[in-house]
Image: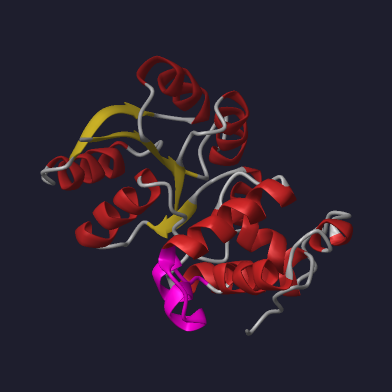
Amino acid sequence: MIRVLIVDDQVMVREGFSVLLNAMPDIEVVGEAVNGRDAVAQVAALHPDVVLMDIRMPEVNGLDATREIVAADADAKVLVLTTFDLDEYVYQALRVGASGFLLKDASAGQLAEGVRIVASGEALLAPTVTKRLISEFSRLGAPRPPAQDRVADLTERETEVLVLVAQGLSNGEIAAHLVVAESTIKTHVSRILVKLGLRDRTQAAVFAYETGLVTPGL
C-alpha cells in the first residue's frame, strides 16, 4: 500500500481527496494536515510514502513546508497541488525538492496515478502543464545558479538524456528515442543526478532549463 498524507487548509478538499484515494486498492490515506507546520510534524510522525501538498496555506505555506520536509529527509516525496498552473510558488517548490505537481481539478484517475508515479521514485513531469510552467518561469528570468561548470562534467550522451528528461520523457520513452535498453537510461539518469548533485528527475529538469540546456518552447 502507498501511504499518503494530504495537506490542505480547506477541509472539503482534504475530505474529497481522501475519499478518492482511499477508494484505490493500492493507496491508503494515513493522515491529513491543515497547514505546513502541521505537515512537517505529521511527516515526522507518520513517515508517509507521498505527501500531497497544497501551496497556498496560512501560517506556514507549502513551499516552506516542502523545503523543511526534504531537508530533513532527502528521500521524502512531495507532490504539490495547486489551483492554477503558472504559480511561482510551485516552481520554487520544484527547485527545493518537490517531485512534481498536479492541478486540483485533476481527475480521480490522474490523482491516483500521480501518487503512484511519485511513490515509485519517478518525477511527475509528463503533463504538458509541467513543461509549460518550467518553461514560463525560465523565460521570465528565473534565478540561474552558477552551475554551467557542472554541465561540463556530463558526457555527450548524458547531456542528451538530461535534455530529454527535461522535456518530460520517461525512461522508456527516452530508451525508445535513443534506441537503447531502458536499463541503460536508468544508469545514465543515476549518473547525471550524482554528477550534478541533484536529488531526482524533477530537479534535473529544472537544472536543464535554468542552465540553458533546454530553452522555452522546446
* Side (left or right) of 207 relative to 4: right
Residue depicted at x 40% and y 15%: 45
Residue depicted at x 50% and y 49%: 99
Q: Is residue 172 magenta?
A: yes
**198 or 77, which lies in front?**
198
* Side (left or right) of 211 relative to 105: right
Horizontal and vertical percent position of residue 171: 44, 66
Residue 28 visible in the current orientation: yes
Horizontal and vertical percent position of residue 64: 62, 35
Write down the quadrant of residue 124 in the picture: bottom left
Residue depicted at x 31% and y 62%: 106
**43 or 9, which lies in front?**
43
Residue 82 visible in the current orientation: no
Residue depicted at x 51% and y 80%: 178
The stretch of residues the image draws in magenta is 168-182
Looking at the magenta stretch, what is its main secondary structure? helix
Q: Is residue 154 magenta?
A: no
